[in-house]
Image (tube, rainbow, N blue to C red):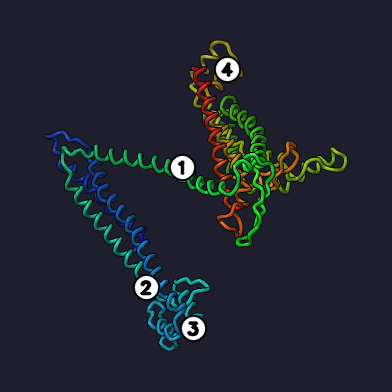
Amino acid sequence: MSGLTAFLFVLVVGLIAFFAGAARARALDDGKIKAHSRPQYHGAWAMLLAVLPALGFLIVWSFGSGAYLNKQIDERVIAQTSEKSAVSDTLVRSLADGIKRLDAPANTNPPATMSELMPLLAGKGVTLAPDTQDYMIPIALDANSMASRFGWLGGLGALALAVLGALYGIRQVAVRERARHKVERVMLGTLFSASTIAILTTVGIVLSMLFQTIAFFSEVSPWSFFFGTVWDPRFAAAGSGGSQGQFGLIPLLAGTLYIALVALLVAVPVGLMSAVYMAEYASRNVRSIVKPALELLAGIPTIVYGIFALVTLGPWLRDISAVLAGGSPFIQAQSILTAGLVMGVMLIPVVSSLSDDIITAVPQAMRDGSLGLGATRSETIRRVILPAALPGIVGAILLTASRAIGETMIVVLAAGVAANLTANPFEAMTTITVKIVNQLTGDLEFNSPQTLVAFALGITLFFVTLVMNIAALAIVRKYREQYE
């Protein structure tokens, strides 16, 4: 029995327990004594008693049986490889002859070699690697059989627990039973667990990067990394013993912030003004057309934007600059300007949609009060609505900036991969995210500085976004206090 099948059976038992518990609660409520909880709470409590212990058992059983099975396989493989690396051809023939699942016709001879045996196993759903050796076949078959038995045992055990929990929950139903309190405690624990998981996931991500970053800084000086102006990791294939290279962060950090700034200069004004228009000026019919059309831009994959920049926008800017300069172009096809423009267009719906929702949420009474005092509509927007919506707008801009900083595909195609340090927006630069991908791609030693630097870049990017969040919170707090 697969885990999914057992899970579905447990859910069916839980639903039965819910309806049975609710029905029993209604039957016991004769009106003489005031019921503490409604029937649906009794049913929910019976369902929780049926589902939660069974699912917990199923999860523990799955991990435990998997670990035990892996241990058995490792022990058998070690035992086999210590004696011989393969079994004889006679053993292969007898093994293939005795496998019932192959269902070979009676008039055929059993396979004599591994090359003949592997297609038969593959035809029956047993996948083998090309370098599979003879002694691995019986181990794999035994492991499959054992996994099937474990699956049935775990499924039946979970189903038995679900039935027992359902019966116990139904028997607990009483007029004065505090089922509502029990259900609410379970829900509170579930919500707390969900929030804890979110926090622990963030902590785990940070720690996973931090430990690798510490290993990187044990080989490379932090000073040369954070203040270095040359990025030349000198990639070496695994085992080649290549030189260490230089890991200057400044060109990558400058490229990340520069391209994000150009993108924000495009996205924020256009997105904010379109949000103001849709929220304050546009009619309902126009809004119903313009808003979905803008949000449609957010559904386009970033690789499509990158291809557009590489094939269309970049060459167009280069040709225009060549015409303006009278020959030699001063704008490269892959440049900061190209990546920033395309990324800015991609981010317009993010700013527009969020800002529109925030502006729309401003109470209508504030608009009416401003207009009643004689202010024009534009003055109301500038002096009343935008200040009231400022905290939310700052949050929208922050989210947009984070999206711009984390973008990769557009930068690869539109700005290139060259780690240059320049202030000219018409030249090529690259970002931290692009180099993270580069450093973790290829046949490399995972413990080399050329690979570990990706984790140092990642945690640096994390702290950059953290500083942005802190600055945004400070701005929001300042202006919110001033407005209040």
Pointer 4 or 1: first along the chain: 1
Pointer 4 or 2: first along the chain: 2
Q: In the displayed orientation, state which residue is furthest to the left.
A: 32
Residue 113 bears which disc, if any?
3
Q: Amino acid at mark 2?
A: Asp
Which residue does the image show at 55% across and 33% down from the upper left?
Answer: 467
Q: Nearer the viewer, residue 427 or 28?
A: 427
Pointer 3 or 2: first along the chain: 3
Task: Quote the CA–CA distance across marks 2 and 1.
Answer: 40 Å
Q: Amino acid at mark 4?
A: Arg
Tag 4 near tag 2, CB within 8 Å: no
Local crowd size for mark 1, using a 10 Å CA cut-off: few (<14), some (14–19), many (≥20): few
Label 4: which secondary element: helix
Residue 93 in the image: x percent, y percent?
43, 84
Residue 475 in the image: x percent, y percent?
54, 25
Q: Amino acid at mark 1?
A: Thr
Residue 242 in the image: x percent, y percent?
65, 58
Task: Quote the CA–CA distance across marks 3 and 1.
Answer: 52 Å
Residue 202 bears which disc, if any?
1
Label 3: which secondary element: loop
Tag 3 near tag 2, CB within 8 Å: no
- The residue singled out by tag 4 in the image is 383
- The residue singled out by tag 2 in the image is 142
Q: Is the N terminus in the top left, top right, bottom left or bottom right quadrant?
A: bottom left
